Image (cartoon, rainbow, N blue to C red):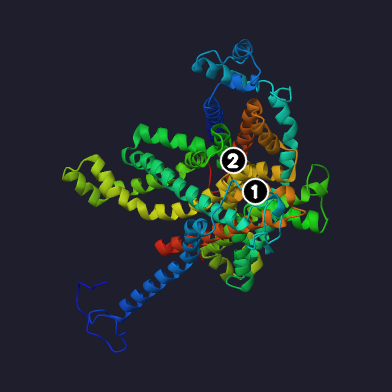
Amino acid sequence: MTVSSSPAPARPGVPPEASPRETASQAAVRLRQRRRAWRLAAWAVPIVAFVVVAIVGPIVVPYDPVTVRLGERLEPPGAVLADGTRAWLGTDQVGKDLVAQVLQGARISLLVGVATVLAAGVIGMAAGVPAGYFGGALDTFLMRFADLQLAFPSLLLAILIAAVLGRSVTNVIITLSVTRWVTFARVGRATTLATREREFVMAARATGASTTRIMGRHIVPLTVTPLIVVATVELGLVILAEASLSFLGLGTPPDHPSWGLIVANGRNYLSTAWWISTIPGIALSLVILSVGLFGDQLNDFLNPKTASK
Amino acid sequence: MGSYLVKRLAYSLFVIWGAVTIVFVVVRMIPGDPAQLMVGAEGTRADVEALRHRFGLDQPLPVQYVRYLGQAAQLKFGDSLRLEVPAAEAVSQRLPATALLAATAMVFGVGISLPLGIFAAMHRQSILDRAVSVVSLLGQSVPNFWLGIMFILIFARGLRWFPSAGTGGVDHLVLPAATLALLLVGVLTRLVRSGLLDVLDEEYIRSAYAKGLTLRRVINRHALPNMLIPVVTVVGLQLGSLLAGAVIIETVFGWAGVGRLLVDAISNRDYPIVQVAILFITTGFILVNLLVDLSYAYLDPRIRYR
């Protein structure tokens, strides 16, 4: 951060890294900002770990949807299998290693979460920004439609759509995008409304910039910051919704071991094999918890004034 | 207030109409012919045609839509394909069980999170406040279907305190209601805590202290009434996720409510039941939110609707 006006003389006690033009209080602000950025980065570590595991995990321990080993079914965590390997998290009812399933499940969660947030974000922006910019009938129609959709508990709407579409990873992404675009549309609209009359937008309009250009170059960039927080919160919700749908048998097909699906598979073996249902649920809780914590921190970082007490 | 009531009722009707329409559109998107699905592989072409005619599927879509709206207004949604009773009747029979479950969860959720949130706000930054934050965050992060299964594992299979599944007396209600309530506790405790902290920063609270009131009286008479509105709003909105959660929790615990009927109907492709179950749950949610909106005027004398 450089200071443009009235160069202040360097005072004693200013940290050596501060430029001579910087006052002590400015250096303190900078230091505090840097510390806040580092703290935010620390909260991101669990999410980065999840992403790495989801991408690299299935490569290290490949998931084989076909092979069943009935001789090794329901082995507890840590059991040594016939081929000498150790099933660290146990095996399921057809003898499949849970480590491979949980890693594959991480990949499915990540894929569905990111794809849905991207799709819902793009749909929501495409609806919300023009609605906020033009107002009028378009705005009324889109926002009434959004209200109607919000009258549905979103998981219930997802259940209805998923039941109609059938089970597949793509259909889960479609279903959840359709049920979650509204939030993005509302935030996109609200930000556009707040930006529409600001000087730089007026200036762009005065210089003859096209409507598309004003929205694309001047308004959309300003919606990014509020949308990042929304996207983080939505990521957790989407991962949870995917698991719930899969648990009900409406999400991923049987050869795609989503965490919700593994939990459902283990339900019939609770007395004999507690680990099948327990372990994917722990993974799921940890991921949603870390996304939630990171979202809170991100919100505090981007909106320090409304930071939670 | 009177015209506001009319306006608000009209809006609720509009939203219910929207829900009916969305269900109509989504169900008509089913790939393939529903009559063919109902008849199954053994059905002849004549069977399919007869069924299409009986359900009006041979009519153009707008005609089907108008007929469907008329039927919906009379709560006639056709017979369940499996149970051979009117779908509306089959769902109505299950409503009390779901209502009991949701209401119990709501009572416990609010009953736990109010004192917990107040306590956390009054002992801000203490170890117990931190603990409350962690617990409420966990309550929001843990998937409820998994939590239900863990409860079965611990309290039904392990300790044998409660039955693991089924509908019946109070002992059957405890685990599913507790699972649902915990989700609510997570959301509400945080809200009560931050809402109370916001209110405590206000000037009139300082005045209340200044005139010599005790902390207890300031909280009870001045702070709490002013944070009820956001709490009541969120309770109303949370009912939506509570009802959706009930669908899952009823499946986990084999609780014979609308939710389990819905999930069974989906796997049986019993679309009349699916339609009615979704419409009934959604309508209940809309009506509760109407009540919430109307209650504002009583909670906050500043709000007087024209």
For the residues beneath circles 1 and 2, the answer to whether they share a chain is no
Q: Residue at x 74, y 50 (%)?
A: A269
Left or right placement of residue A139 versus residue B131 in this view: left
Residue identified by numbered label 1 = A68
Q: Nearer the viewer, residue B125 or A78?
A: A78
Nearer the observer, A99 or B195: A99
In front: label 1 or label 2: 1
Asked if B94 appears above or below B147 in the picture, the reply is: above
On residue B261, which mark appears? none
**Residue A226 percent across, percent down from the top left:** 40, 54
Residue B290 seen in this snapshot: yes
Q: Nearer the viewer, residue B111 or B225?
A: B111
Where B139 falls versus B213 (above or below)?
above
Badge 2 is on which residue? Answer: B289
Q: Is residue A186 left or right of residue A94?
A: left
Q: Quadrant of residue B97?
A: top right
Say what amino acid the circle numbered 1 marks. Answer: Val
Q: Residue B25: x, y in percent?
A: 52, 27
Q: Chain of mark 1?
A: A
Q: Please tell me how many numbered marks the rendered image carries.
A: 2
Quick check: B19 left or right of B145? left
Q: Dot 2 lies on which element?
A: helix
Residue A294 placed where, x, y %? 48, 62
